[in-house]
Amino acid sequence: MKNNQVILKYQDLSTIVDQLRAQHQTIVLTQGSWDMLHVGHARYLEEAKKYGEVLIVGTDSDEKIRQRKGPGRPVVPQAERLEMLTYIRPVDYVVLKPEQAEKYSLIKLVKPDVLIVIKENYSESELEEIAQYCGEVKVLPRMATTSTSAKLRSVQIDQTKKIESKLLQAIDRVLAEYRD
């Protein structure tokens, strides 16, 4: 892992952003859970980097994800998600977004030249609200046919069907014993 890329505290990120601004770097920000990285994530980050010189990726903490997606998530713990993102070529910095962070606090802190989002995550009024903290808000489409949540649901459904089948077979055997 490239430790200098992972920022665990917003205060540290503030210093980095100030340095980047002094160097007249174009800063791009995007954020998400990044649970079970897949090709759609990589494509999305590759596309995001095209909008500037420095790509900062906000990563939800485990607590923040559990709060939003339920007790079975994340599948991959935050330390591993943070590290995995450092291996994605376009990513310059990864910052942990704590559960208690105020709404839009990372966006307000970075004030990116370009904020990259997907439409499903923000309403029109939210996009208008966050636009005041950014040079530009760019809405990208999803870059894979399924999401991590959809893949997990598919696995759960398959497992449930297998369990159901075995359970029905066991019930049939027990009933057959009683009939005999």
Image: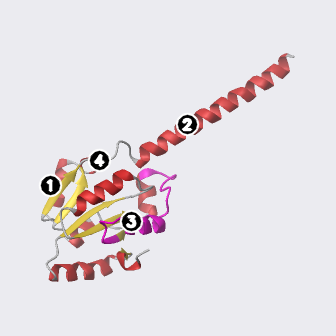
Residue bearing the label numbered 4 = 142
Amino acid type, label 1: Glu
Tag 1 or tag 2, which sits nearer the N-term? Answer: 1
Q: Which residue is located at x 16 percent, y 71 percent?
A: 26
Identify which residue, 91 or 74, lies in the foreground. Answer: 91
Residue bearing the label numbered 1 = 128
Amino acid type, label 4: Arg
Q: Which mark is residue 85?
A: 3
Cα distance in 3D space between marks 1 and 4: 20 Å
Instruction: Give yes or no for contact between labels 4 and 2 (Cβ–Cβ under 8 Å).
Output: no
Q: Which residue is located at x 74 percent, y 29 percent?
A: 170
Tag 4 or tag 3, which sits nearer the N-term? Answer: 3
Q: Identify the image quadrant of residue 4.
A: bottom left
Q: Secondary structure at mark 2?
A: helix
| Quadrant for the C terminus in the image | top right
Query: Which class describes the residues within 10 Å of circle 1: few (<14), some (14-19), or many (20+)?
Result: few
Cα distance in 3D space between marks 3 and 4: 18 Å
Tag 2 or tag 3, which sits nearer the N-term? Answer: 3
Query: Which class describes the residues within 10 Å of circle 3: few (<14), some (14-19), or many (20+)?
Result: many
| Relative image position of residue 62 (x, y in whole percent) | 46, 62
Query: What residue span does the magenta drawing correspond to?
Result: 69-94
